[in-house]
Image: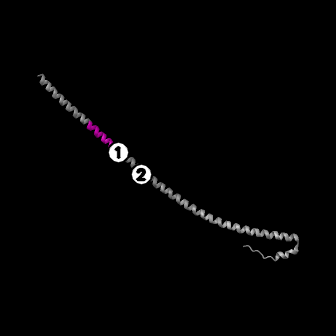
Amino acid sequence: MASSSGTCSGSSSLLQNSGSEEDLQAVMDQRKRKRMTSNHESARRSRMRKQKHLDDLVTQVAQLRKENQQILTTVNITTQQFLSVEAENSVLRAQVGELSHRLESLNEIIELWLCVRRRGEDEVGIIMSFPTVSFP
């Protein structure tokens, strides 16, 4: 009987071990499913972060392109204004040169006239014989 009870107890032990192994396998399977679910969720969150980052970059590129276009427009307008002012300055410099020359001529005439006045009226006839200078 001892062997019978030992066998019985051995069978019971095998059944317990088998049940314990099944429980262990079930726990491991549960952990595996939980880990897989967690990994899938983590991957989904990672994809969402990447997509948001990509969307943010696309928005930033659009904004930078808009700013770049505005800057180019401003540069073009400023360049046109510069060229216009430069042309106007060129005209004004030419006018300054012309007016300076005319002023020198007038100063020479005044100087000559003052000289004649100091010497007397006899020399007025000489000055009157000079051609007249007409200025617009």
Identity of the residue drawn at 23% across and 34% down: 23
Identity of the residue drawn at 65% across and 64% down: 89
In x, y percent, where is residue 134?
A: 75, 74
Counting the numbered discs, the total is 2
Residue interval drawn in magenta: 28-43
Quadrant of the rendering where the C terminus is positioned: bottom right
Identity of the residue drawn at 61% across and 65% down: 84
Toward the left, the furthest residue is: 1
- Check disc 2: other Cα within 10 Å, few if <14, some if 14-19, many if 20+: few
Residue 116 horizontal side relative to residue 35, left or right: right
Residue under label 2, please give it: 55
- Check disc 1: other Cα within 10 Å, few if <14, some if 14-19, many if 20+: few
The type of colouring in the image is one colour
How far apart are labels 1 and 2 at the CA level? Answer: 18 Å
- Element under label 1? helix
Residue 90 horizontal side relative to residue 38, left or right: right
The residue mark sitting in front, 1 or 2, is 1
In x, y percent, where is residue 58?
A: 43, 53
The answer to whether 123 is drawn above or below residue 68 in the figure is below
Residue under label 1, please give it: 43
Q: Circles 1 and 2: CB distance less than 8 Å?
A: no
In x, y percent, where is residue 52?
A: 40, 49
Give the residue type that dot 2 points to.
Asp
Q: Which one is earlier in the sequence, the residue at label 1 or at label 2?
A: 1
- Element under label 2? helix
Give the residue type that dot 1 points to.
Ala
Which mark identifies residue 130?
none
Identity of the residue drawn at 77% across and 70% down: 106
Residue 49 horizontal side relative to residue 113, left or right: left
The answer to whether 20 is drawn above or below residue 80 in the figure is above
Quadrant of the rendering where the N terminus is positioned: top left
In x, y percent, where is residue 81?
A: 59, 63
